Image (cartoon, grey):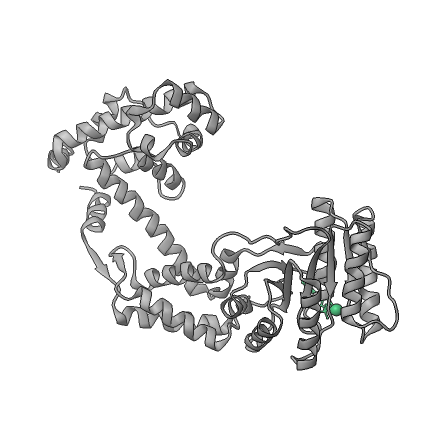
Amino acid sequence: LSGKLSGVFEGLSKRGALSEADVTEAMREVRLAMLDADVALPVVREFVSQVRERAVGHEVLDSISPGQAVAKIVNDALIAALGGAGAVPLNLEAVPPVPVLMVGLQGSGKTTTSGKIALRLATRERKRVLLASLDTQRPAAQLQLAQLADQAGLRAQGLVVSLPIVAGQGPVEIARRALDVGRREGYDVVILDTAGRLSIDEALMAEVAEVRKVAQPAETLLVVDAMTGQDAVNTAKAFNEAVGITGVVMSRMDGDARGGAALSMRAITGAPIKLTGSGEKLDALEEFHPERVAGRILGLGDIAGLVERASDTLDQEESERVARKMMAGKFDLDDYASQIRQIGKMGSISSILNMLPGMGKLTQALGGKELDTSILTRHQAIISSMTSKERKTPDIIKASRKKRIAAGSGTTVQDVNKLLKQFDDMSTMMKRINKMGLKGLMRGGGM
Ligand code: GDP
Ligand code: MG
């Protein structure tokens, strides 16, 4: 008999749990990878101890190694710690002109990022943006911002403008004037670009805190250089405690930094990372993708490979779960949808069925029809437009439900009928398998 089949059943029956030793071994590697990616030490310690707790005793199929299982748990935990899947957009829900305050150490990329955000808001949302430099110590900083505003304004048909410089005003006065001008001249957003110091100092913090109090920004964005290593903790803590931040921008993600600072920032401030800078040019601004950065942090070849292999195997577990339901005659439309998702990764329903001996006869009973894979994506859309009750008990899907499902999935009632017919054929087949019993099937298959 085929080795394939015995493989499937071995996977079904043998289960185990991760032991303390398995986890300790794997976490040693994770710890090194994180430190190598420049995640701050206290953040690494906390993360590792939390994940260790979660992983010990975790159920795994025999088909994946303990190392793979832990790597997968770590990867998922890291994505969650970085803010979960997907990007968090800027929150500009306020009465215009909406103030946005940029804070951070000198050289972190505040001024450049101010220009990038302005250009993005102007070109993508047709917003009128006023840029104001609050850096009164360095005239060059004010000129730098004015130049960036000119460039952005040129590219966005004049939607971006910088506040004229008035000698002798302090940061708080400039912020007030910027908001005044913003109100009077009908700007949508006012970006306040503060001065930075090379290191954290009390005077700077007091100044920025005062500006925040006066301007009441919708967003206070901490800009951090992605290359920042262990002192990321201190910077984040200091700004969050003294000023309070609502989001983080990681600049210089185009460099060879592995992005560990992102995890440190998120862990210490709790504020979401909203954007990343990927170059000096004005359009080098991107949404933050936790999955990608997680991959970069764990980027040591071994661990990345482990995660990949574990994911493949987990897909296989899902297929096996569905196969079990099939054999128990309890296959429903949710399982069908899950199978469609697996196709291309693991293999189709027919390939799973082909692992069962005696399937040839049953496929013949279906008129020799194979599943048409080209319509599976459409089927997926149709199923996702169904309620969960409809997926569990497709029998209740009559004319009016069909119409609703077709409209919801951008298909026709005919398409819905075809899906239901196909599903019905499959269920009939399952029932036959069930009736014959697994043992009968195996004998029938010539064991
Ligand atoms: P600020 O002192 O915080 O205002 O920092 P700046 O905006 O003046 O940036 C300092 C330097 O970093 C400038 O030379 C920028 O061109 C550069 N820079 C800013 N953001 C990025 C980025 O995302 N990638 C790269 N490669 N350089 C950047
Ligand atoms: Mg600056």
Quarter of the figure with residue 31:
bottom left
Rendering coords of residue 233 (x, y %): 54, 75
Residue 440 at x, y percent in the picture: 11, 33
Q: Position of residue 29 (x, y in %)?
A: 40, 71
Q: Quadrant of residue 217?
A: bottom right
Q: Is residue 282 visible?
A: no
Position of the C terminus, as image quadrant, is: top left
Q: Is residue 381 visible?
A: yes
Q: Residue at x 49, y 65 (%)?
A: 297
In this rendering, the count of numbered labels is 0
Figure quadrant of the N terminus: top left
Position of residue 268 relative to residue 347, above or below, is below
To which quarter of the image does residue 200 belong?
bottom right
Residue furthest toward the right?
Answer: 167
Classify residue 376 as left or right of residue 436: right
* 151 with respect to 408 (left or right): right
- Position of 423 with respect to 344 (left or right) is left
Q: On the rendering, which quadrant does ligand 2 occupy?
A: bottom right
Image position of 272 with respect to 435: above or below: below
Most foreground residue, 402 or 299: 402
Between 117 and 68, the one lying in front of the other is: 117
The residue closer to the viewer here, 121 or 297, is: 121
Q: Is residue 399 above or below residue 427?
A: above
